[in-house]
Image: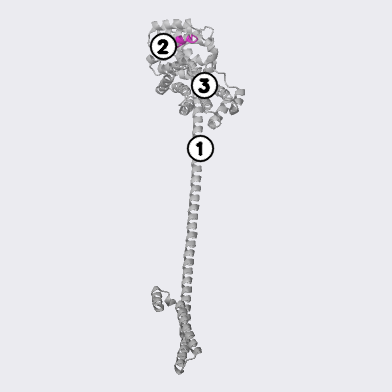
Amino acid sequence: MVCQLLGLTLREGTATSASNSFRRGSSIALVLATWWLGATSAWAQPVRPPASAATADSLRQLPRWPLARQLRLAQARLLPGSPAVSVVQAWERKQGQGLPREVYWDLQLALGRYYIDNNQPSQAVRQLLAVRQHCWPDSGRTTDADIWLCYSYDMLNQHRKAMSFGLEAARRVPRTTAPRQSVSNIYVVIAGAAINAGNNTLGERYYRKILAHSMAVGDTTYLGEYFMLLTHSAIEQKQFARAHQRLDSARLYMDNSDAGVRIMERETTANLALKEHRYREAELALRDVFSLMRRRPLWKSEILALLVPALEGQHRYREALAAQKRLQETQATMFEATTHRQAQELEEAYAAAERTHEIARQRQHIGRLQAEEQLRAAQYSRRLAWLGAGVLAVVLLSTLVGVGWAARQRRLRAEREEALRTRIATDLHDEVGTLLARVSLQADMLSYSQASPLAELARLQTNARAAAGTMRDIVWGIDAQADTAGALLDRMGDYL
């Protein structure tokens, strides 16, 4: 039932946003219908039930379930006060670690939808922009983020941004496959943003698209509401004859048993009567919904805002003044609630900014500690390198000193050996050679003194000469001065 759906979607700040739209010249019924159609256009139809305590428990254990159930749980609607909200926010803080990315995207979308239901459009914008950045390759989820961004910016009265995201969502709707959101719902949100922005022509064009699409798919469930939206567009353009025709068409498709639809129809009738200066009819239409307003207290200020000019038009100023006072009291209450909500939203934004700054400071501190650790490591490495270089230099120097010392020792040993060889050769030549020369000379002298030399004397001369030759060979081999090529050639010549 439309009435039941309205009971789930309307929130405290809706009347304030609607009142602003009414003061800009737009009809409050148009804004309320846009809110309802936007709020009931979540992922897939029918709308999934709100997340309960059991759902919260399941969300805490989300990774253990199959993917299909994870997606169903992630797409559950989060209403204010639901225990599942804190669970989803915890997954958001952990950035969905351990979850498939599609499940994490749906959780982010559900959280953005929660901020809209909780009348926190600024929070919703921040959340949905982050979602849009993460899931841009996914056309369905990006379309979800765009249409909710359109609605959130419309709540913040930033209609240009709202229209840009809404038109982007309309362009991205697949033509061959069914989108995640209803095409009619997307068009309703865009049309509402266009009307609030003062572009009645664009709004009416999208309302006509809604009707054409609904009739093309054979869905007549909300045709009455769609015709009422077109009625308000005609009223704003002061096309009263066309407005009567569209209102009659809306009544043909309306469910009169639904209180929300009856309120919308009576409010539209009263608005049209006021524009045509039929103040009595407007008053009667508005008083028909007083009994229903007990179930819709948030519409009280909007009905009173129409009732005051209706009474003034009949010159019933006392009653008009009483209605005006009631309207002011209601608006003051709503303003206080809105101010409290905005203050709470600013506090949450401030707390989020402080958390972000604290995280940034902690990261900066960690970065500074890491830089200091890297500097200490670099200094240690540099010192270790210098120590290694010093040790290597000492080793090289020691090696060079050792090699030099060994070479010097070898040179000294060679010099000593050469001196020894020279001294031995000199001693042999001077001492032994002299003695052998004496023996040989004495043998020669004896042989000359004898008339007939003896055989023993001849052998003595031969042995003496052989010993002298052998001594010369030994002295030449030992003498260090003979270790040259020239000495060898001279020796060979002497030998020959």
In the displayed structure image, the side of residue 87 where residue 302 appears, left or right:
left
Q: CA distance from mark 3 to mark 1?
A: 29 Å
Where is 454 relative to 160, above or below? Answer: below
- Characterize the local packing of mark 2: few (<14), some (14-19) or many (20 or more) Cα atoms within 10 angstroms: some
In the displayed structure image, the side of residue 80 where residue 404 appears, left or right:
left
**Residue 243 part of the magenta-drawn span:** no
Are the two marked residues, 2 and 1, in contact with CB atoms closer than 8 angstroms? Answer: no
- Residue 39 in view in this figure: yes
Which residue: 55% across, 29% down? 99
The picture places residue 104, in percent across and down from the top left corner, at 53, 27
Q: Which residues fall within the magenta stretch?
A: 208-222
Type of amino acid under label 3: Asp
Which residue: 48% across, 71% down? 409
Where is 421 relative to 125, above or below? Answer: below
Are the two marked residues, 3 and 1, in contact with CB atoms closer than 8 angstroms? Answer: no
The picture places residue 389, in percent across and down from the top left corner, at 47, 58
Q: Quadrant of the C terminus?
A: bottom left
Label 2 element class:
helix
**Mark 1 sits on what residue?**
359
- Residue 318 in view in this figure: no
Could you say which is closer to the camera, residue 138 or residue 251? 138
Q: Quadrant of the N terminus?
A: top right
Among the two numbered marks 2 and 1 on one chain, the one whose residue lies closer to the N terminus: 2
Q: CA distance from mark 2 to mark 1?
A: 50 Å
Q: Nearer the viewer, mark 2 or mark 1?
A: 2
Q: Quadrant of residue 191?
A: top left
Q: Which mark is residue 208?
A: 2
**Mark 3 sits on what residue?**
117
The picture places residue 20, in percent across and down from the top left corner, at 44, 19
Type of amino acid under label 2: Arg
**Residue 218 part of the magenta-drawn span:** yes
Among the two numbered marks 3 and 1 on one chain, the one whose residue lies closer to the N terminus: 3
